[in-house]
Amino acid sequence: MEAKLELESILLPGVEGKRPLIIAGPCSAETEEQVMNTARELSANGVKIFRAGIWKPRTRPGSFEGIGSTGLPWLQRVKKETGMYTAVEVATAQHVYEAIKYGVDMLWIGARTTANPFAVQEVADALRGTDMPVLVKNPVNPDLELWIGAFERLNRAGIKRLGAIHRGFSVYQKIKYRNDPQWQIAIELHRRIPQLPIITDPSHISGDSELILEVSQQAMDLNFDGLIIESHECPARAWSDAKQQVTPAHLKMIMNDIVIRDASIGDKPRTELDELRQQIDILDKQIVEIVAKRMSISEKIAKYKYENGITVLQARRYDEILASRRATAEQNKLNPDFVIKLYEAIHEESVNRQTAVMLELQKAAK
């Protein structure tokens, strides 16, 4: 279902509309000196919007949860001395009132807050009657409807200057990134609300400063509108998320290395078909990666079977797999015969892998 929102530009006066819009600054405002030093360097490199965490929702108590309202006058000083706009995360009505009181120019709602409709509604009600640009991070878990619902709540409160922050999604298993990008969800958001700007957060997706360029380039190749990147004068001394922050100098190198490609195909603008095909490409890549992980586990099973004198082929286990996958196919409204053919091919390759591993182990034992 397509969402109908009444939207206006999130761009602030003097900020260019060309891609990518850059928002940068430390994960957390720690000291006035740290904030000012970082802001001066970023401003010298052309950054127009300075972000800083004032209130930090943390997973476990005892971690640094932000300097609080004490840091808001520091942001006022940033504006006065550098001319940059300022942006902070808010999670409660009180945060909103404090941010407005100290002249913050842009707000964003964090992933944990987006996941709580009551909290989003509280923020929306506190913003009613303002013209504040508000960015909304995707919820922690991959739930597009919950993400869209947050925009709808804000829009119904009269907030029209809205944008999305795509920061990836939490996953239990260990992957390359801190958060799984699941690009297809952000692409579907764009398809559903084409006029909504999407800003990617490569810091939180990657969790590693060395991967920020890679993620940023992917976002630009998907024609997203901007990047929000954590930058600290000295990441090694950061009080939170040190590994995913970059120095202003490193950020400048990243921005110089990003290639901004034309969003059109030949002379034709991108169509909904192009975007749907893009989603398929991303999902196909994930399918191949998942199959590769499955084969890796099959090889570990082969080693266990060799060490315990178990044959490669276990007929009963294979029958159980086929019955289970057939049932799963039916639950997901897929043709069971198609899924069985798919698993027959996967099983054949798994048997080949296990046989090869057991032969290698047998040779090594001689």
Image (tube, rainbow, N blue to C red):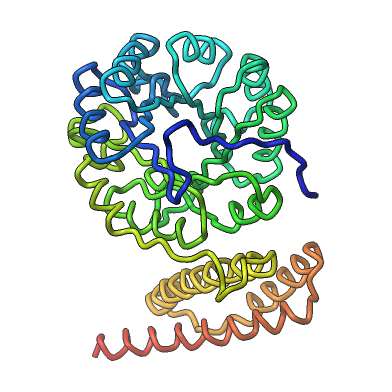
Work out which quarter of the rendered image holds the C terminus and state it: bottom left
Name the residue rendered at 50%, 71% in the picture.
294
Measured from the top left, where is residue 76 in percent x and y? 34, 15
In-front residue for pair 5/60: 5
Measured from the top left, where is residue 225 in percent x and y? 50, 49
In-front residue for pair 348/105: 105
Q: Is residue 91 above or below residue 296?
A: above
Q: Is residue 161 above or below residue 247?
A: above
Q: Is residue 69 above or below residue 333?
A: above
Name the residue rendered at 38%, 84% in the picture.
357
In-front residue for pair 315/82: 82
Name the residue rendered at 34%, 31% in the picture.
27
In-front residue for pair 288/89: 89
Horizontal relation, residue 288 to residue 241: left or right: right
Quarter location, residue 39: top left
Q: Is residue 77 above or below residue 106?
A: above
Name the residue rendered at 33%, 11% in the picture.
73
Measured from the top left, where is residue 120 in percent x and y? 64, 25
Measured from the top left, where is residue 50 in percent x and y? 35, 30
Horizontal relation, residue 297 to residue 213: left or right: right
Q: How many marks?
A: 0
